[in-house]
Image: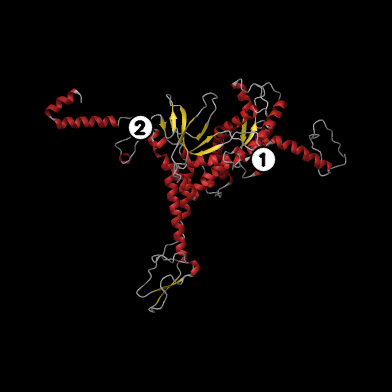
Amino acid sequence: MNLSDRLVSVFSPERALKRHVARQKLNIINSGYSNSGASRTKKSMVGWMFSGGSTKEDIDDNLTVLRERSRDLYMNTPIATGALKTINTNVVGAGLRLNAQIDYEVLGMSQLEADAWETQVEREFELWSESIFCDAMRMNNFYDLQQIAFLSFLMSGETFVTLPFMEKPNMPYQLSISLLEADRVCSPQGNTTDKIINGVEVGAYGEVTHYHIAQFHPLAKTFGEKKWMRVEKFGKESGRQNVLHLMEAERPEQRRGVPLLSPVIESVKQLGRYSEAELMAALVSSMYTVFIKSENPNEPPYGEVIPDGQRVDDEDENSYELAAGAIISLGENESIEQANPMRNNSSFDGFVKAVCRQIGSALEVPYELLLKHFTASYSASRAALLEAWKMFRKRRAWMAARFCQPVYEEWLTEAILLGRIDAPGFFDDPIIRKAYTGAEWNGPSQGQLDPLKEVKAAVMRVDEGFSTRARETSELTGGDFWRNHPQRIREENARRESGLGKPSKEGPTDIGEEVETDENSD
């Protein structure tokens, strides 16, 4: 309160108070966002109940409920199941495949030497990755583990991976992959401190130093003693990454992941309830048939005319059952009130689509893809798929960088130490190490609504130098041009030798080999 207000308050306290309140209101509605989103005076905003907090209050304190609800939706609600499976299928599919791409110029190799080295590495990697012995549980191969890790990340918001070394029969490599569900990483006895946040221990600068991993799943129905292992994120001497943490951060200083379905949990649950109610109402409506009212006390009571094989709950006297085509007798002093549920509901489909558009927008999955419902024009459907594939490619690059590439680097290190791969200077210089570990990870192709148009566009991109045959092969079919090329040479030579084909207009297929042709041939 300023000096003038104090003087007024001496003679008129009420008037001084009004002056002070008016001045505070002027400060509130001053300018900028206070006129709109930050307004505290507009009636449309006064009823907005809001609050804010750090990542601990907003995320960490709610993670247990979010995870359990998200997994429940995946297991019991078709829309949620379809959304997560659609993303998983398009991002990972049958697994991201290694395409070694070393920097041969840094390594002083020729291109032919680099190709030979890459082929050897890919062959060795397949020996390990296609075996179930790469899994610590010995149940899945590397490509199955990708699907499990990514789907768990979508459901729970994060997945933890450890890379232990285990001896295996008939396998030269000991590296193994162990997937841990998000719940396993938690604070000992549930005590979160300023240094241990939901099982993640941080250092003086906020960097992650350790993970606290429960011996058993916290939700498991076991009676064993609860124990935790304190695992370093990086080895002190080797600098090896002991734990891979697959999560996407949406805020600074966030250290635990949020399930993908979190923003739409309520919408998906309510839509599931609505669908279930409509289904049950339609089913009940279809079973209303004939009721007989009689004064004869010998008529069978309610429900007994339903055949024995169709009744499911005879033991409960309060259970009333319906069956298709049933003729139900009414006892003495009983009557039927006709209830017409007005099914089928003509607004059901439109309402579901409207809600799915909102859900799809939040998940970056167009509702056409979410519902597998393509009835729009070619241009509209293609636009929806292209928009979805922006998200799929982003998540694929993330999965490759956070899971596939670190695992590959660990495997390559072991292969070099075992002497199965020759890589001079690998342990001497980080630049050389990076040059050796370069790789691409190829996954399922986008697919085409009109294959002819897509192939013509790919040919034009290659002819104009905008792309390469290797990239277009990967994008169109998910194949490998450098494996297709020698196979096509063998196929074309075999066709000519058997008289089924004619030589290419561009000349001989085999380098350095002349092909004799029949001048009179067509």
Q: Nearer the viewer, residue 285 or 377?
A: 285
Q: Is residue 503 visible?
A: yes
Asked which secondary structure carries label 2, the reply is helix
Q: Nearer the viewer, residue 58 or 120?
A: 120
Above or below for 26 versus 454: above
Residue 333 appears left or right of 369: left
Of labels 2 and 1, earlier in sequence is 2
Asked which secondary structure carries label 1, the reply is helix
- Residue 411 in percent (x, y) is at 61, 31
Residue occupying image coordinates x 22% and y 32%: 21
Residue 453 appears left or right of 370: right
Residue occupying image coordinates x 35% and y 32%: 33
Check disc 2: other Cα within 10 Å, few if <14, some if 14-19, many if 20+: few
Q: Which mark is residue 6?
A: none
Q: Amino acid at mark 2?
A: Tyr
Residue that numbered label 1 is attached to: 455
Above or below for 264 versus 328: above
Q: Nearer the viewer, residue 197 or 273?
A: 197
Check disc 1: other Cα within 10 Å, few if <14, some if 14-19, many if 20+: some
Q: CA distance from mark 2 to mark 1?
A: 51 Å
Quarter of the view holding residue 423: top right
The reply to whether dot 2 and dot 1 touch (C-beta < 8 Å) is no
Quarter of the view holding residue 322: bottom left
Residue 411 appears left or right of 514: left
- Residue 494 in percent (x, y) is at 80, 41
Q: Amino acid at mark 1?
A: Val
Q: Which mark is residue 33?
A: 2
